[in-house]
Image: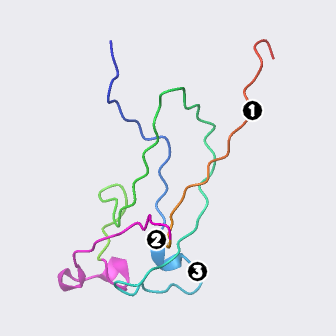
Amino acid sequence: MTLAGYQQLVRGEPFRGKFRRSFEQPEPFVPGALETVTFTMPDVNHVFRRGHRVMVQVQSTWFPLVDRNPQTFVNIPTAKPEDYRAATQRIMRCRTQPSGVEVSVLPALQEGT
């Protein structure tokens, strides 16, 4: 059996961007403005073997796993149909606006330890 092209979710962590600076004072994004969003995901102690690749997905909604995101700065549980908008997320990856992912790497264990 070959698993060529197989993809498996190793870690998923919904994080609302409106809380990027503070959980006490959420802030809306300004359309078209560049923003830095930094957050930490708990470790899962996963082993990536030689030849494995890592995929990172950034999306504005994870429905139906998490509630729908109206893409507007409203109270989500009381959002009306007209509050919902289409949204585009852009990840900058150029020299002047780089993006990155930091991954902790543990040393390999010696056999028998």
Relative horizontal placement of residue 53, taking residue 87 as reference (left or right): right
Start and end of the magenta stretch?
A: 71-95
* Badge 1 element: loop
Question: Which residue is label 2 attached to?
Answer: 16
Are the residues flagged by discs 1 and 3 in contact, CB closer than 8 Å?
no
The image quadrant of residue 57 is bottom left
Instruction: Determine which of the numbered discs, if any, sits on residue 107 in the image.
Output: 1
Q: What residue is at 49 percent from the left and 56 percent from the top?
A: 13
> Which quadrant does the C terminus fall into?
top right
Q: Disc 1 marks which amino acid?
A: Pro
Total labels: the figure holds: 3
Bin the neighbour count of mark 2 within 10 Å (Cα to Cα): few under 14, some 14-19, many 20 and up: few
Is 47 located above or below residue 95 in the figure? Answer: above
The answer to which of 68 and 47 lies nearer the viewer is 47
The secondary structure type at the circle numbered 3 is loop
* Classed neighbour count for the residue bearing mark 1: other residues with Cα under 10 Å, few (<14), some (14–19), many (≥20): few
> Which quadrant of the rendered structure holds the N terminus?
top left
Q: CA distance from mark 2 to mark 1?
A: 33 Å
Closer to us: 21 or 76 = 21
The amino acid at mark 3 is Arg
Residue 66: mark: none
User: Within the magenta stretch, is there residue 79?
Assistant: yes
Residue 61 placement (x, y as % from top left): 33, 64
Q: Position of residue 35 (x, y in %)?
A: 48, 79
Mark on residue 21?
Answer: 3
Which of label 2 and label 1 is nearer to you? 1
Q: Amino acid at mark 2?
A: Arg
- Secondary structure mostly seen in the magenta stretch: loop
Return the disc, 1 or 3, that comes first in the chain's sequence.
3
In this rendering, would 20 be left or right of 45? left
Q: Nearer the viewer, mark 1 or mark 3?
A: 1
